[in-house]
Amino acid sequence: MFHFRVKDNPALHAATLHAARTNTATLALYILSPQDLYRHDYAPIRINFHLRNVRTLRDTLASKNIALIFRVAKESESISEIFDELIEKFSVTDVFWNGEVAVDERKRDESLKKWLSMKGIGANQSEDQFIVSPGKVTTKEGKVYTVFTPFKKRWIEYIENHLSTLTLLPEPDIQKATLPPSIVETVLQYAEIPETLPDVINPGRYPYYPQSLTPHDKILPRRSLNSDAKAVAAAITRFPEGEIEAHARLSRFVTSKCGEAYKINRDFPGKEDGTSKLSPYLAAGVLSGRQCIIAARNANGGKLGSGKDGLVTWISEVVWREFYRHIFVSFERVSKYRPFLAATEGVEWIYDDAKFKSWCEGKTGYPIVDAGMRQLNETGWMHNRLRMIVAMFLTKDLLIDWRQGERYFMNHLIDGDWASNNGGWQWAASTGTDAQPYFRVFNPQLQSEKFDPSGDFIRKWVPELKGVKGKTIHAPHTLGKSALQNMGYPMAIVDHSEARLKAIAAFKAAKG
């Protein structure tokens, strides 16, 4: 997990306190592994956002007399090999870091602890993935909640009974200890942060990746880590880097009409200020979930579960993020490409590469689906209502394996977050915890009419339909094949009514 911030950063806080006690200098370390980025399906736009934030963090740390070492891992290097090199060069005595939630990263952290201990180096892992740690919000029987509403209720109760949970850690003071001149010269060799990254020849895949999906990977070809130049350029303006920007956005949102009206406006993709657009900053660790909850709670009169409808609804969204993280830690299978609901292992997904390609390109013949996919492809971001619509269309109307969609999102989103993305896809596919019941299938036309009633959002992203008037924008197939061909827009690639029944039958068969 990345933590591009100096405020409320547990590992940085612990390291600087230790440095003050021992009168030693603090060095910050950022190791970037292109191979891991490939294997985790990191979007180029997300990598660019991270690199921009690393540069800002480096400058902020420099003002605190803390140097940042930037190291790009080679394909064959292990984390221990890199640490071995750096520990010797910089005479390191203690290492501090924030842990992660995914199963392989947790194993890596445990291995690092053991390796450092063997070397006689202090190993200090902090927790920063949760506002409330797993195990503290459980049922009366001590079990993990697998349904969101009771989890949220208990989570809020815990916070209200343990307000110290919302204590923010301060940013570090200017460090008094300085590095020896010989080490300063070595640090300068690691100070440069590249604009682009080396591509990986053989990234491989994790052993958990389903064999059933491997033949269809050609639809998601291995892309350069430095691609998507148009979306990357737009994101520099749309999502500027840095803590200052993130906190300014957070403050504006929770104290303005945008926050107050969030419950009403959040489902309408055409409303530019309908959502907070803080997700990239949360996903990159530029903001912490705790900072978001505190800001919203303060703006809501010290309340979490009641008060201003908009802020209460937004707080719920932050708690959803927390919920999916608890699930990730408590049920390893969900971070191994497995469905949460074992019964859905037997769903016979259809691996139709042509239809999947149409979905990816926003050429399904369903305007609201196509508008959402094109927004994603061009900007690296998609409105949350659209994420639900396009995910359900892929998994229910096309009956295509949710894992293909999950990977496509991660390959393109600037705010890609493994736990939240996985949770959202499994919700839509009816395979996850607290998922949408399999017999409830969004009607894309009705979703379009309800959440883009004027059709203006569709016309913006599907310009082939800009001349279509009135409600026909939501059902252009009624114009006929010839008219659509003249516009350059496809007929619907599937009949929703028939597809819905087919999907329900497939899930019933899986349940037995």
Image (cartoon, rainbow, N blue to C red):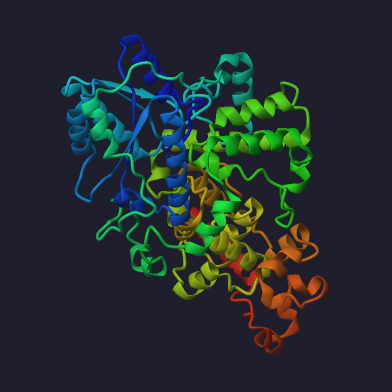
Front residue of 500/159: it is 159
Q: Residue at x 64, y 36 (%)?
A: 248
**With 274 as the anchor, is 504 left or right in this view?**
left
Residue farthest to the front, as pictured: 181
Quarter of the image containing the N terminus? top left
Front residue of 190/369: it is 190
Callout count: 0
Q: Residue 506 location, x and y as percent?
A: 52, 62
**With 306 as the anchor, is 17 left or right in this view?**
left
Q: Residue 174, can we see it?
A: yes
Front residue of 244/267: it is 244
**With 293 as the anchor, is 187 left or right in this view?**
left
Front residue of 259/365: it is 259
Place residue 151 in its image quadrant: top right
Q: Residue at x 46, y 72 (%)?
A: 352
Q: Residue 30 location, x and y as percent?
A: 34, 37
Residue farthest to the right, as pictured: 470
Q: Residue 430, can we see it?
A: no
**With 495 as the anchor, is 189 left or right in this view?**
left
Look at the picture and state if 335 lies above or below 391: above
Q: Residue 291 location, x and y as percent?
A: 58, 28
Q: Residue 166 location, x and y as percent?
A: 58, 20
